[in-house]
Image (tube, rainbow, N blue to C red):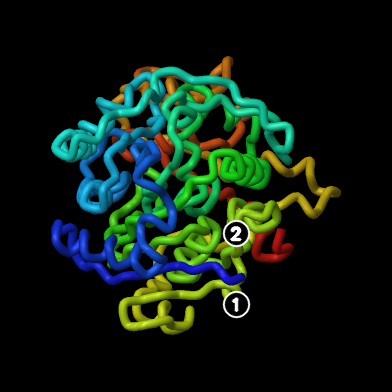
Amino acid sequence: MKSKVAIVDCRKYKPELVEHAVSTAVELLGGWKQFVSSEESIILKPNLLARTDPENACTTHPEVFGAVGRLLRQNGFEELYYGDSPGNHLIGVAQTADGCGLRQVAEDLGIEIADFEEGEQVPFPDGHAADHFVLCKGVLEMDAIINLCKMKTHQLERITGAMKNTFGCVYGFNKGASHARFPNADVFGRMIADLNRLVRPRLHIMDGIMAMEGNGPQSGDPTPMYVILASADPVALDTVFCRLVNLDPELVATNLYGQKYGIGTCKTEDIVLMTEEGDISMEEAVSRWGNPDFNVERDPGFRGQFKSIRFLQPLLDRKPYVKRENCIGCGVCIQACPLDEKAIYMKKGKPAYRYRKCIKCYCCQEMCPEKAIDVKTTRLAKIADRNWKL
């Protein structure tokens, strides 16, 4: 059976426009009761990476969250909660939601914060990369998850969308520790696929009205994509995102392993694209909403096929670096490093790297509030990729 992805045009974060787009997308898929029942407890899982203005396109916009909440209330769903595990485990979900403009919207709708302050280890013996996860109690206490993800880039996985957004179900410091356990895009992608097999959100709704390109997932640039996407298949939804920005979906590890592990499909021919006007082809969707100049990593990347040159890997890795003119010396990057012996430390009031220890998880770049950390590709890596297609 083919996976259905609804795609609806939405030009602005005006409540009536967003609510129409979300309502239309869900109705195209069969309506809310196709995925959840009014007797269940439901958690809305937005992207609340950091306290930042929603106009920065880093987090799920409050209007999208509000539209989902209002529509669920209108359709008789009473037991609603929300939560996410923020990137900085020292800052709680309430503070982060407040800084993102989402907390007040939730309070107005009577949607309570679920318990994301405690975690519980959950065995997962069927995992391919992970045999257990430490999940937030609020996730474990709910009957169903509705995933409200953001359309944006990611320095480790190229993009973060429906599949990656479930990482916020992992409790506190364990998110950072996961980067140490799964230190590259491939194994991290396998872990994310395992996590999706465990928590299995019922429905995924992507805020793509204003996306983030470039140095994501926090320090990139907002760029309009003008879409709300929805699907029960997170891999198919992320695949549509990839196609709209001219990125091969199979270069994204979360897509590749999501398909391999039976979560969904990243094959265009196995996806039905649904709009208000009727079903359309992927080519038609790209023509209408696509942005071929979207700033995202499209190179095949370094997958370690050439074992004979593995000793060169430290010279080939993409490295984080500090843009000193932007850095205010706040130390958030050091807090974000998941290693016990930090790969980043303070030197003369500014952070500096011990690259031999760095596992290239880019948590420092992800959490920098001043966009002062970027990631660079070495000259050798550029030559290698151009000539060897690693």
Q: Residue at x 61, y 25 (%)?
A: 122
Label 2 element class: loop
- Residue 64: percent from the left, percent from the top? 25, 52
Question: Mark number for residue 380?
Answer: none
Q: Amino acid at mark 1?
A: Glu
Image quarter in which the N terminus is found: bottom right
Residue that numbered label 1 is attached to: 269
Side of 122 relative to 80 (left or right): right
User: Is residue 101 in view from this perspective?
Assistant: no
Label 1 element class: helix
* View extreme (right): residue: 308
Q: Residue at x 68, y 39 (%)?
A: 314
Image quarter in which the C terminus is found: bottom right
Q: Residue at x 61, y 54 (%)?
A: 263
User: Is residue 34 in view from this perspective?
Assistant: yes
Residue 344 lies, with reference to residue 63, above or below; the image says above
Q: Residue at x 54, y 67 (%)?
A: 3
Question: Mark number for residue 264?
Answer: 2
Q: Amino acid at mark 2?
A: Gly
